[in-house]
Image (cartoon, helix red, strand yellow):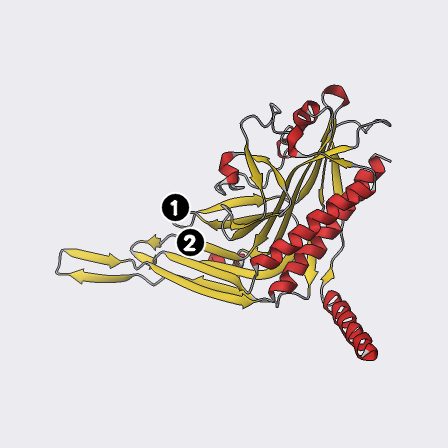
């Protein structure tokens, strides 16, 4: 019986090692924007976790539209191409479990290195959160960002806006989604730090996405072309989705999903503020099959009819080409991808934090 038990343990261990080895991470390269001073030698090591948000992509659409082309009554009708790709098999319970594990290990690492975690009792009466509402996990829900799930750790308890608490706040960007500025860095949490007797305030965002969108520019010259393909990675990502309110038939909205680790302490000239993020997303192999869905549409040729001797009518047909596909994914394996990549990023950020406060 003892021999059988040892053999079973060996099998479980071997399987676990094989399972972990089947997923590989790319290089983790972080960058840090320091906008404040370095912590003083006797700086407080009391920490308040202001937010811990996880975003996971499960569905993506790409759309391309070309208006009709006409020259002296000849040409092509308008063309619209739409490609859609989604995941089947994602398990909310597994994502919650791995998010909980990330959060617990993050807190344990802070405590093991001499940091004290502050609870909400000291925070609820601060001016910074005077208009906020209580917000706590566990949460796995469809977010206001199209095709994205939002996950909040079971043990997280904090404060946020009513709009965010109700799941209606999105990361929708303005007219120029590619522009990044210092305004993106902070929520002025140095003010909160001051109200907490200069405690360290930390905000964390993790984003796991798997889509690459955008059709071929060469194919787009001849008509509409849309494409979605798989590329699993952790890191900040700008995703697009067909606009529901736009008047333009091919209009898309853009959403900037953050992946960062922001630290704030103190205020004024002595404030400590930095934001850590990835120079480039961390690719994850061994989880999703390489899959691509593409849709092209050149539009119908115009047809001209003579009506009697007085009228000539040109018919411009509106055509829409759609192509949708779903990829099967192992729910536990997908959740593990979130954990191993999120863990790699957070550990890298904590190393930087611990070095600052050693």
- Of residue 195 and residue 84, the one placed in the foreground of this image is 195
Q: Quadrant of residue 312?
A: bottom left
**Residue at 43% in and 59% down:** 81
Q: Secondary structure at mark 1?
A: loop
Q: Residue furthest top?
A: 268
- Does residue 203 lie above or below 94 as drawn? above
**Residue at 66% in and 49% down:** 235
Label 1 Cα neighbours within 10 Å, binned few <14 / some 14-19 / many ≥20? few
Q: Secondary structure at mark 2?
A: strand
Q: Is 70 placed left or right of 257 in the picture? A: left
**N-terminal-most mark, 1 or 2:** 2
In the rendered image, is residue 222 in sight?
A: no
In the rendered image, which quarter contains the N terminus? Answer: bottom right
Which residue lies under the disc numbered 2? Answer: 65
Residue 194 tag number = none
Q: Is 27 placed left or right of 327 in the picture? A: right
Residue 2 position within the rendered picture, expressed as x and y whole percent measured from the top left: 83, 77
Residue 4 position within the rendered picture, expressed as x and y whole percent measured from the top left: 80, 79
Residue 52 position within the rendered picture, expressed as x and y whole percent measured from the top left: 64, 42
Residue 257 position within the rendered picture, expressed as x and y whole percent measured from the top left: 59, 45
CB atoms of marks 1 and 2 within 8 Å: yes
- Of residue 97 and residue 277, the one placed in the foreground of this image is 97
Q: Quadrant of residue 19?
A: bottom right
**Residue at 71% in and 54% down:** 341
- Does residue 204 lie above or below 123 as drawn? below
Which residue lies under the disc numbered 1? Answer: 248
In the rendered image, which quarter contains the C terminus? Answer: top right
């Amino acid at each position: 019986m003892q021999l059988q038990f040892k053999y079973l343990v060996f099998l479980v261990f071997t399987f676990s090692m094989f399972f972990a080895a089947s997923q590989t991470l790319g290089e983790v390269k972080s960058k840090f924007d320091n906008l404040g001073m370095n912590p003083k030698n006797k700086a407080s090591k009391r920490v308040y976790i202001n937010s811990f948000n996880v975003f996971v992509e499960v569905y993506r659409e790409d759309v391309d539209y070309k208006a009709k082309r006409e020259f002296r009554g000849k040409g092509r009708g308008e063309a619209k191409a739409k490609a859609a790709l989604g995941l089947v098999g994602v398990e909310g319970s597994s994502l919650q479990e791995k998010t909980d594990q990330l959060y617990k290990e993050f807190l344990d690492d802070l405590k093991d290195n001499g940091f004290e975690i502050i609870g909400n009792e000291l925070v609820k009466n601060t001016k910074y959160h005077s208009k906020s509402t209580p917000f706590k996990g566990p949460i796995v829900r469809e977010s206001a960002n199209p095709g994205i799930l939002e996950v909040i750790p079971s043990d997280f308890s904090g404060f946020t806006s009513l709009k965010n608490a109700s799941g209606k706040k999105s990361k929708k960007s303005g007219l120029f989604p590619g522009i990044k500025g210092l305004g993106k860095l902070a929520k002025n949490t140095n003010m909160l730090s001051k109200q907490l007797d200069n405690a360290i305030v930390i905000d964390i965002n993790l984003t796991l996405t798997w889509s690459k969108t955008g059709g071929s520019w060469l194919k787009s010259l001849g008509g509409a072309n849309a494409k979605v393909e798989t590329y699993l990675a952790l890191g900040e990502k700008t995703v697009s989705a067909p606009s529901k309110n736009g008047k333009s038939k091919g209009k898309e909205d853009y959403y900037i999903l953050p992946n960062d680790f922001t630290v704030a302490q103190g205020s004024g000239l002595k404030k400590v503020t930095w934001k850590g993020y990835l120079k480039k997303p961390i690719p994850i192999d061994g989880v999703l099959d390489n899959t691509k869905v593409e849709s092209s549409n050149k539009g119908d040729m115009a047809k001209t009819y003579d009506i009697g001797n007085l009228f000539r009518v040109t018919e411009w047909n509106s055509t829409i080409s759609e192509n949708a596909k779903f990829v099967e994914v192992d729910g536990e394996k997908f959740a593990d991808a979130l954990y191993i990549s999120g863990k790699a990023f957070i550990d890298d950020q904590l190393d930087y934090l611990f070095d600052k406060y050693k």
